[in-house]
Amino acid sequence: MKGFKTRLRDGLLIIAITGWTFVGAAIAQETIRVGLMDLNATDSFRCQSAQGNYEWVLPDGQKLGPLKGMPTVTSHNGGFQISSVEFPEPLPYVILQPVSIDARLRIVTSAVGYRQYPGALHFVHVDDIPQFIMESTLEDYLPGVLATEVGKGHAMSFYAAHAMISRTYATKSMGRHRMAGFDLCDQVHCQVFDGTSTVNDTLQRGCQSTRSLILVDRLGRAATTAFHSNCGGKTWAGSDVWSDQLPYLQSVDDAACADAPHARWSQTVPRQEWDEFWSLHEADSMQGLLTARKRYGWPSASFQINPDSLRPDVYKVVGSGFGHGVGLCQEGAMQRALSGATAWEILQHYYNGVRLSKSDQL
């Protein structure tokens, strides 16, 4: 296609068409673009409408026709070849645009199997590398985050609490990946998102009951709503793990997670190796704990080093918790919800001095 190309310029994704230019970071506030990194490992996939109707559209608005059946899309020669759409050459950028707002798209790949996504799906080649970007409303994206991050089978107040912190996290992090042309990725780096195929009515209601509500600090700014799997009985202050001094991320006791699946763990480490490592880090023991966790891949930085009576050449590492330990402890919050705590009571326990606000009032 003459006049159509994608490129990286000064680190920012620019998608240029004759007479029209799109800059990836400039999007409507209520819209979120999610980079689907899981799909980058595949060169070919099939797509089908799971709900509603879709049509193939170019970025300049030119319509190529409706999505029919389950065509195969193949990355080829710097573009995408669509088996059901006749076109003289691969398209470097094509969009599957929903015809109705409730439409859902089914994607099947050998790498990740079956996924379902709301909104539009952008297929774009940048410097001959395929990228996949979902564009939807924040509220349509949110249930998929909860389905992936915490799964099914929990109390409604827990889902409502997590919906508010995940919505806040997304709002706070909007544009985090703007250099790549999207806001957030679908990995642990942002919030894990495997689409919406496993979303049930309970998850949906938990999100809808808190629609647009986010947590803000005393100055009315979106809070950094960190969360993790299990704190091991006591959360860490944000300043213990990161350089930011955030008054609402304080260390709090949390016995509610003590009997949860990720509350305890154990490992071993060679005695001589550990002695040499710790001799270098003991003076800054807090940072040393964090460094040890990263170096050895341990579930948390809360642990004790004990001699092993059966193996004198190793230490036994006895740890508690899973994750960085800052903010909301998911397994503790789950138990609090089961014990009758409301969503707001759960949030007040883990975030000190925050209040609720509408996301459009920032």
Image (cartoon, helix red, strand yellow):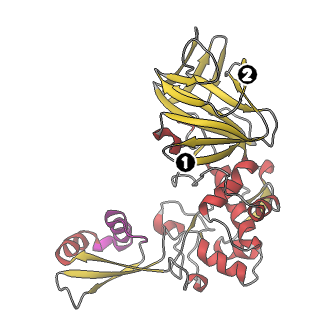
| Mark 1 residue type | Gly
Mark 2, other Cα within 10 Å: few <14 / some 14–19 / many ≥20: few
Q: Where is residue 205 in the image (x, y as percent from the top left)?
A: 80, 62
Viewer-proximal residue among 142 and 200 = 200
**Highlighted range, magenta:** 282-300
Task: Report the residue marked by disc 2.
Answer: 65
- Residue at the spot 50% in from the left edge and 76% down from the top edge: 262
Q: Picture quarter containing residue 265?
A: bottom left
* 296 w.r.t. 105: above or below: below
Any magenta on residue 10? Answer: no
- Residue at the spot 73% in from the left edge and 21% down from the top edge: 65
Viewer-proximal residue among 64 and 309 = 64
Q: Quarter of the image containing the N terminus?
A: top right
* 76 w.r.t. 19: above or below: below
Task: Report the residue marked by disc 1.
Answer: 113
Q: Picture quarter containing residue 98?
A: top right
Residue 302: mark: none
Q: Where is residue 235 in the image (x, y as percent from the top left)?
A: 54, 76
Visible residue check, residue 13 = yes
Residue furthest out toward the bottom: 309
| Mark 2 residue type | Gly
Q: Position of residue 86 (x, y in %)?
A: 63, 16
**Could you tell me which secondary element the residue under label 1 belongs to?**
strand
- Residue at the spot 58% in from the left edge and 33% down from the top edge: 181
